[in-house]
Amino acid sequence: MSRRSAYGLLLAEAVSVTGTRMSVVAVPWFVLQTTGDPLLTGVAAFVEMGALVVARILGGPLVDRVGFRVTSISGDLVAGLVLGLVPVLYAAGLLAYPMLLVLVGLAGLFRGPSDNAKYAMVPDVAAAAGWSNERAAGLADSVNRLGSLIGAPLGGVLVALIEAPAVIAVDAGSFLLAAGAVACFVRTSSRGSPGSAESEDGYLASLAAGMRFVRQDPLLRAIVAMVLLTNLLDQAMTAVLIPVWGNDRFHDAAPVGVVFGAVSAGAFAGSLLVSVYGGRLPRWRTYAIAFLVGAVPRIFVLALPVGLPVVVGVALVGGVLIGAINPLLSAAEFERIPARLRARVLGAVGGLAWAGIPLGGLVGGALATTLGVTGSILVVGTAYLLVTLDPLIRRRTWRLMDRGTPIANLAQYSSRK
C-alpha cells in the first residue's frame, strides 16, 4: 500500500501526457483543416501554451492553498470537460474559431495548476514508497518521455483513421482518467498549506513569497536562466531548423521523425537509468557532463557532411545523457523547497523556464532566413555550448545541487514581513 500512491501518480501522468501529445498533433491539424490558415493554427497553439505557462506561474499559491491532490483532480476534470466540448460543438455546427480559442485556452489554464500539483506530489509519494528523490523523479520523467514518444505518433495515426475531433475527444477522456487515477490511488501527507499562518495572507503576498524564494536561492536562479535559454534554443532547432535541415538534405520529412525519435528513445532510457542509479551519482558533475556532452554534439553533427545513421547514432547517445538532466534537477529542487512553498516555487521555476519556448520558433525562423540552415545550426550550437558551460564555470553555485549542501534560512521567504 505504501507504493500505491506512487504508482497511481505515475499512471495518472502517463495517461495525461499520452493524451496531451496526441492532442498536440490533433488540434493544429483540426485548425488547419477547418480554417486553412497556418497563422490561425499558430495562434491556437500559442493561446493554449501561453495559458498553460501563465497558469503554472500564477497558480502556484492556489495549489499550495487548496492542496496538491484536490488541485490535480479538479484541474484534470475541468480540462477534460472543456476539451470534450470541442468535438461536441463541432458536430453540432456551433464551433466558431473564437470559441475554439476560448476552449483551448481554458484547457491550458486548468492544465497548468493540475500538472504543477502532480509534480509537487512526487516527493511525498516517494517518501511513502521509500524511494529516493532521484528514483521518483527519474520514473516520473520516464513516464513523461514515454508518453511523448507514444502519444505524438499515435495521434498522427488516429487523426488519419478517425479524424481530429475524435482524437481531441480521446484527449479529453485521458484527463478524466487521470483525475480518476489520482482520486482512487493517490494519498499524500502534504496538502499544500491550508490552515497555516502563511495561507492566511493574500494571494499576491503568497505569490511574492514563491518568487522571492526563486530570486534569492542561487541554485534556482541558475536553473531558471540556463533552462530558459536551452529551451529557447531547443525550440529553434525542433520547430524550424531540423525540419529545414531534413528538407534541404533529404527532401523528405521521414529523417526528421527518425532523429526526433532517436532523441526521445534515448532520453527515455536515460531517465530510467537515473531512476535506478541516480541515488549513487554525483548530481552536479553528472548534470554538467550530461548537458554538455549530450546536448551540444547532437546539434553540431547536423552541420557535418555525414550520413543519417551517424546523425541518428549521435542523437540516440545524446538522448540517453539528456534523460539524466530533469531527474537530477528535480531531486535537487525537491530537497531545497519546503512543502509549504512547493507548488508556487516549482510553478515559478517551471513557468519561467518554459518562457523561452514561444520565442524559440521565432528565433529559429529569423536565423534560417538570414543565415541559412547550416549557419543557423552553427550559431545555435555555439550558443548552446556557451550556456552549457555555466555549471563548469560557476561551480560554487551549481554544486548546491549535491546532497547535503546548505539551504538558506527559510524564514526570510515568508510572505509575512
Image (spheres, helix red, strand yellow):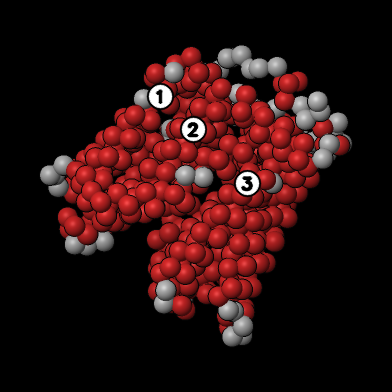
- Please report contact status of discs 1 and 2: CB closer than 8 Å, yes or no: yes
In the image, which disc is placed on residue 144? none
Residue at 61%, 28% in the rendered image = 215
How far apart marks 1 and 3 lie (CA) works out to 26 Å
**291 w.r.t. 44: above or below:** above
What element does badge 3 sit on?
helix
Q: Is residue 355 left or right of residue 233?
A: right
Asked whether residue 185 is in view, the answer is no
**128 w.r.t. 41: above or below:** above
Residue at 46%, 77% in the rendered image = 35
- Please report contact status of discs 1 and 3: CB closer than 8 Å, yes or no: no
What element does badge 2 sit on?
helix
Q: x, y percentage for residue 192?
A: 76, 38
Residue 294 appears in which quarter of the rendering? top left
Q: Which residue is mark 1?
A: 390
In the image, which disc is placed on residue 225? 2
Residue at 43%, 56% in the rendered image = 150
259 or 236, nearer to the observer: 236
The kind of residue tagged 2 is Ala
What element does badge 1 sit on?
helix
Q: Which residue is mark 3?
A: 56
Residue at 39%, 53% in the rendered image = 362
183 or 230, nearer to the observer: 230
The kind of residue tagged 1 is Asp
Which quadrant is the C terminus positioned in? Answer: top right
